[in-house]
Image (cartoon, grey):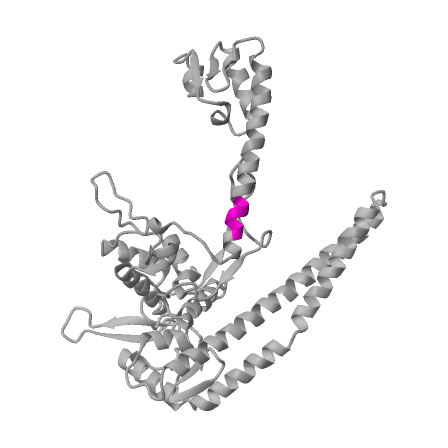
């Protein structure tokens, strides 16, 4: 509208009220002056103000200030209401674009059985080794509608998935039946900009707030797997369930999928060290069929003393939780950082030499604090990894007779193929054993 006025298409703008014209007083006056300079007036019907009149701008300034204050008051009341509902465990979401759930009675989430199957497929395929890009590509190829349920110009549902959508689904706690509230917040009532809540405001976590689509242990394992794939040293290949987990005991390289006799009746798929022939000294580890890897995993899993392993897991978790050294050190360093900051604030007239000294001290403390913070994060991740492993091992039953790609993903960290025709299986709990191929 403003652009049209500046281009000579308008000579008068009629607005219902001052509050509908701009968010705040500054925006109102600035825009009115721009229009007034080119001879375009604005009439506000409710307040009976014409900006081309001599008293128009003064009245507008007063009315805009009142409208801004009213807007602030309304915003604060609405914000308080929303946060009070969160503290009471009540919440609402965008059901129209939330895959797997519909709005039930009293606004509670109820599972949409058809969409829930898509969610289960995404979690399952991710744990089977597929990348988020690969999952998105296959959902698109299968013409699965996206969560937004948007339609194109021909009236057909949009089926183009993106990796970012898959990541969002995999990290959403609502699929395990919980709800984390106030993940984001609006910074102020004028700009309406949304910011991620990194601790500025209270976040509310409600356990078992609704029916789950994904079992807790599977959801937790996805978070561990996501963290593992984000590590700089980790190279992920999502071709098969064995990708990235089966490794060569001679050189440490990944065992890749290879096709032999691809053009004749003897065609078969095998797994082999990706660097087997890339160096002068050829790796001595054997080439394996898929069936051999599966059987070896079953043998390894069934050889585990479940009772002993679960007891070891419990002891490991207790030991990690009792070691509060990283947390105490981080708290101590944080207190020292605050002391340095306060000293600088109280002495604004320090010499350059003193400033350099405090700056060096501050930077050293911050660096040490980051190290301790990482130790705390690693400790929490280790506890979660062992707890999730124990849950999944317990749920697997005393004897496993058929290979399960889900158990492979949920329990196993890596499988190292050795040149003496054995495979060492290392589980997420740290327990390991070796079986003959």
Image coordinates of residue 96 in percent, x first then y, are 33, 49
Position of the C terminus by quadrant: bottom left
Residue 57, how many percent across, how many down?
57, 15
In the image, 252 versus 239, the foreground residue is 239
Q: Is residue 246 visible?
A: no
338 above or below 311?
above
Type of secondary structure dominating the magenta stretch: helix
Q: Quadrant of residue 288?
A: bottom left
Residue 81 within the magenta-colored segment of the rendering: yes
Q: Residue at x 31, y 79 (%)?
A: 287
Q: So how many labels did they put on this image?
A: 0
**Figure quadrant of the N terminus:** top left
The answer to whether residue 44 is above or below residue 295 is: above
x then y, percent, for residue 70: 55, 32
Residue 136 pos. (x, y %): 32, 56
> What is the residue that sits farthest to the left in this orientation?
265
298 drawn magenta: no
Instruction: Tell me: 292 left or right of 390.
Output: left
Q: Is residue 116 placed above or below 418 in the rendered structure?
A: above
Please name the residue shown 55% across and 13% down the image. Answer: 56
Residue 353 visible, this orientation: yes
Residue segment shown in magenta: 79-84
Q: Quadrant of residue 280?
A: bottom left
Of 228 and 285, the residue lying toward us: 228
**Residue sitting farthest toward the front:** 106
Q: Is residue 60 above or below residue 368?
A: above
């Amino acid at each position: 509208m403003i652009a049209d006025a500046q281009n000579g298409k308008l000579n008068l703008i009629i607005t219902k009220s001052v509050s509908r014209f701009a968010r705040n007083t500054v925006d109102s006056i600035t825009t009115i002056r721009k229009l007034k300079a080119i001879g375009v007036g604005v009439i506000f019907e409710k307040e009976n103000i014409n900006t081309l009149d001599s008293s128009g701008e003064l009245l507008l300034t007063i009315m805009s200030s009142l409208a801004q204050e009213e807007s602030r008051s309304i915003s604060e009341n609405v914000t308080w209401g929303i946060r009070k509902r969160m503290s009471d465990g009540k919440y609402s979401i965008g059901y129209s674009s939330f895959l797997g759930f519909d709005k039930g009675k009293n606004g509670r989430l109820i599972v949409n059985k058809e969409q829930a199957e898509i969610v289960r497929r995404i979690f399952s395929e991710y744990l089977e080794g597929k990348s988020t890009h690969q999952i998105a590509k296959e959902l698109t190829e299968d013409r699965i509608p996206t969560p937004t349920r948007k339609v194109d110009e021909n009236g057909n549902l949009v089926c183009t998935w993106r990796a970012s959508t898959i990541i969002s689904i995999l990290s959403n706690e609502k699929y395990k039946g919980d709800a984390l509230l106030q993940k984001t917040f609006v910074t102020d009532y004028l700009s309406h900009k949304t910011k991620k809540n990194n601790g500025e405001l209270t976040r509310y976590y409600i356990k078992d707030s609704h029916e789950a689509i994904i079992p807790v242990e599977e959801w937790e394992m996805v978070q561990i797997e996501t963290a593992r794939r984000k590590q700089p040293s980790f190279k992920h290949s999502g071709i098969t369930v064995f990708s990235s987990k089966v490794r060569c005991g001679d050189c440490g390289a990944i065992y890749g999928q290879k096709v032999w006799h691809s053009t004749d009746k003897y065609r078969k798929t095998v797994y082999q060290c990706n660097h087997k022939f890339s160096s002068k000294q050829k790796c001595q580890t054997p080439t394996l069929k898929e069936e051999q890897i599966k059987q070896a995993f079953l043998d390894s899993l069934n050889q585990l003393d479940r009772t002993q392993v679960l007891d070891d897991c419990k002891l490991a978790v207790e030991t990690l939780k009792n070691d509060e050294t990283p947390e105490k050190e981080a708290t101590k360093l944080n207190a020292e950082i605050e002391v340095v900051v306060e000293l600088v604030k109280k002495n604004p007239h320090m010499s350059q030499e003193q400033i350099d000294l405090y700056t060096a001290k501050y930077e050293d403390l911050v660096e040490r604090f980051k190290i301790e913070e990482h130790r705390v994060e690693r400790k929490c991740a280790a506890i979660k990894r062992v707890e999730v492993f124990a849950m999944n091992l317990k749920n697997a039953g005393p004897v496993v007779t058929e290979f399960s790609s889900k158990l492979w993903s949920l329990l196993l960290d890596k499988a190292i193929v050795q040149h003496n025709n054995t495979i060492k299986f290392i589980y997420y709990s740290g327990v390991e054993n070796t079986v003959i191929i």
